[in-house]
Image (tube, grey):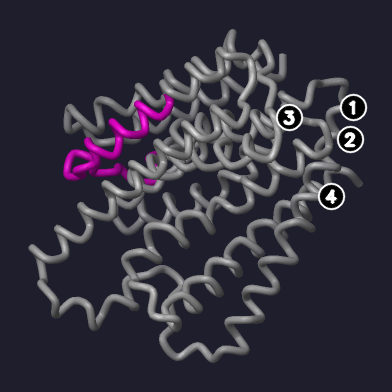
Amino acid sequence: MDLFYATLGLVILLLAGDSLVRGAVNMSLRLGVPALIVSLTIVAFGTSAPELLIAIRALADNAPGIAMGNVVGSNTANVLLVLGIPALLATLNSSECETRKTYVFMLTGSVLFIGLAFRGVFDWVAGMLLLLALAFVLGDSFLHARRHRREMAGLALEADEEEEVEGADPDMPWWKILVYLALGLVGLPLGADLLVDASINIARMFDVTEVVIGLTLVAVGTSLPELATTVMAAVRQQADVALGNVIGSNMFNLLAIIGITALVGDIPVDQEFLDFDLWVMLGASVLLIPFVFLRQNITRAWGALLTALYVGYVVMVLA
């Protein structure tokens, strides 16, 4: 039953997160917030809402290992699994992508995160540092996006901005927007409660630590939306979407999820993370260098290697 409740909680989280994004996007556009701001903030934060609620709920239940494990495990899974499986289906032409700047931000954020982890706890000081780094990245992204739009299409593009935002529907009535918001706001904490409580019970049942459950069951579960997005991008030959999705998700996991949660309460860092898991996460991020800087495509051979590395990592964690 615990496995059923964990699955149910995960499904509710994913559906509620999508509902919240749709409602928030359309409400913001109706209130006159520029679509560019909406796409860089509301959509990005909304898609990370399930992970954030899990982290806060885990902290409230005195299970910080699930909060840390979810973030660290998700970042590892995003590179090895979320890029590996789609590459097995079709080669990702990452040689055509321009993601160097964003990747450097992600790698820098990873190093900052690991450095703060060696303080032994993510407290409000660490949280503020992570959120300041996030604000810098968002500010740079906003300036770059605005400059790019002016160069490519000028002011004429503004009329079509709403269509560029994920989940936007210019004709959505207010009652429907409010329903989406309500479903998201109710579903997120409900799903987080179910998933975290069930995960703690599963850890006790199989006599494994909450860290292990966070690194595996919870991390893979919350990476499913990224996996679905990347599979579709691979099928449609949109390597920039696949690579950008992974890099952006990893950056938000480190800077936003732990940054905000650390302001709610202290997150102690288990020695297991310092000895092994953080370095695996960093190593997985470094593996992206050939695709980002050396213009290599993510071929089926690379996909097999990445997937095999993830399977090996999970086996080591469970052992």
Quadrant in the picture for the C terminus:
top right
Q: Nearer the viewer, residue 135 or 276?
A: 135
Instruction: Please state the total of marks drawn on the protein image.
Output: 4
Q: Assess whether mark 2 and mark 4 are in contact (beta carbons under 8 angstroms).
A: no
* Real-space CA distance between mark 1 and mark 4, rounded to the nearest whole angstrom: 16 Å
Residue 162's spot in the image, x, y percent? 34, 78
Give the secondary structure at mark 3: helix
Residue at which label 2 appears: 201
Q: Does residue 172 sit above or below 134 in this rendering?
A: below
Give the magenta range.
87-110
SS state under label 4: helix
> Amino acid type of disc 4?
Phe
Of labels 4 and 2, earlier in sequence is: 4
* Residue highlighted by disc 1: 204
* Closer to viewer: mark 3 or mark 2: 3
Estimate how packed mark 2 is, as few (under 14), some (14 to 19) or many (20 or more) residues with alpha carbons within 10 Å: some
The residue indicated by pointer 4 is 4
The reply to whether dot 1 and dot 2 touch (C-beta < 8 Å) is yes
Q: Earlier in the sequence, mark 1 or mark 3?
A: 3
